[in-house]
Image: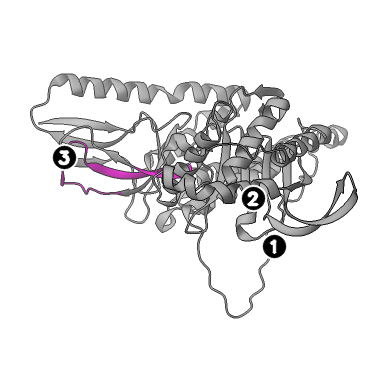
Amino acid sequence: MARVELIMPKMGESVSEATIIAWTKEIGENVELDETIVEIATDKVDSEVPSTHEGKLVEKLFEADDLVQVGEAFAVLETEGGDSSSETDNADDKVEDASAPAPIAEEKAEDIPAPAPKAEEKVAPIVNSGDRFYSPLVRNMAAKENIGIDELNSIPGTGKDGRVSKADMINYLNNRTATTQAEAPKSETTTQAKEPVKEVKSEAPKAEAPKAAPTPIANTGDVEIVEMDRMRKLISAHMTMSKATSAHITSFVEADMTNIVNWRNSVKESFKAREGQNITFTPIIIEAMAKAVKDFPMINVSVDGTNIHIHKNVNIGMAAALPDGNLIVPVIKHCQDKNLVGITKSVNDLATRARAGKLDPDDIQGGTITMTNVGTFGNLMGTPIINQPQVAIMACGVIKKKPVVMETEYGDVIAVRHMMFLSLSYDHRVVDGALGGQFVRKVADYLEGFDTSTVV
């Protein structure tokens, strides 16, 4: 018998970690080659991990809700036959893994010099008790930060059955560091009590800024409390981070969609008969956005500190509502190289797989600018939140008939037209009002100037 470690595979570009949702096999059960052994979630996409070997599951290295890094072992199988090379490779991997945290510890020592007594403190290794489970990741974090079992037990957990997650540890450590730094000057003042009063006053710490207290929720007498699901927690964290990161500003224009509406009505039946799918307004708007990006390339950028990354490819994210009410943003890549038919097929494919929960991790990666259609819900306009690390997101309102004043060679007339509001939220750190306003106006110009002789 040989023991083989199953490694978390790479699931897409820029995906470095995954959260275990559920195990499909229990310890002692046999696992076939390519049989699903665990279900995982990366960002907003759920997927399955097949076994790379055949054997009996003898050890789970992580539990549900634990975070696993790509390339890290997550389970151990007992296989028949086998050879010593597999065990040697696994041993080498373990040695490398054990040595990996060393540079991190050195960086922390350099960035935040700790007092000598604390650096020599040793804390007993964390072990799981019958009352509470701690994942290997949480135990490693606790060991690096000299957190004992009593202190770890006091940390509130937001995971399944009250388990402590990585996010819980990060939040606790941030608060713990702030508390330690606030208390350090107090201890210095105590030890220097015999020094002259002037010196004590000169080293007195500044008063710590008061922390915002949570807003109390009134008890109305009839309340149901439900916990956010995993995806809603991710969306909440991402949106809050975006508002805290970017200086949001929004510009609005109104576009006359009459020609596009009439053109689509004339081709939609023949297009569906030939291609087997519908042609909607979404790909037409995305095509106009791709053209406008060529005119204003500085809207197709990302910010990294004080560096601006100018993307040559136009990868447009398409915000889509899921049946459960959550939101996901699949990406139509290389829009600058696709015609209207190509964009339409990409939009329909991604939308269909998004609703069925069959998107791949790469399908939601690499976006450079985003479009969201608030008109789907009958809304006139919206002020969307930027999808980081992008710097702009455009919202399209409902296409609605309304009376419009039009200039003709015979004078001004009032006509009934199909009108739509476009709104662009952009990051004022790098996109000024002139650029943001010109870009959204250019998108409207391309829509209003749509060639009605286009053949699809």
Q: Which mark is residue 32?
A: 3
Which badge, 3 or 2, comes first in the chain's sequence?
3
Q: Which mark is residue 215?
A: 1
User: What is the residue that sits farthest to the front in this orientation?
Assistant: 410
Residue 32 sits inside the magenta stretch: yes
Which badge, 1 or 3, comes first in the chain's sequence?
3
Q: Amino acid at mark 3?
A: Glu
Whole-percent x, y for residue 401 in the image: 72, 59
Mark 3 or mark 2, whichever is nearer to me: 2
Q: Quadrant of the N terminus?
A: top left
User: What is the residue that sits farthest to the right in this orientation?
Assistant: 411
Dot 2: element: helix
Q: Which mark is residue 261?
A: 2
Q: Is residue 105 visible?
A: yes
Q: Amino acid at mark 2?
A: Val
Question: Between 250 and 268, which is closer to the camera in this rendering?
Answer: 268
Whole-percent x, y for residue 133 in the image: 36, 50
Question: Between 63 and 210, which is closer to the camera in this rendering?
Answer: 63
* Residue 212 to residue 146: above or below: below
Which badge, 2 or 1, comes first in the chain's sequence?
1
Dot 1: element: loop
* Stretch in magenta: 23-47
Seen at 69% across and 37% down, the residue is 392
Seen at 26% across and 33% down, the residue is 6
Mark 2 or mark 1, whichever is nearer to me: 2
155 to the left or right of 197: left
Q: Is residue 148 visible?
A: no
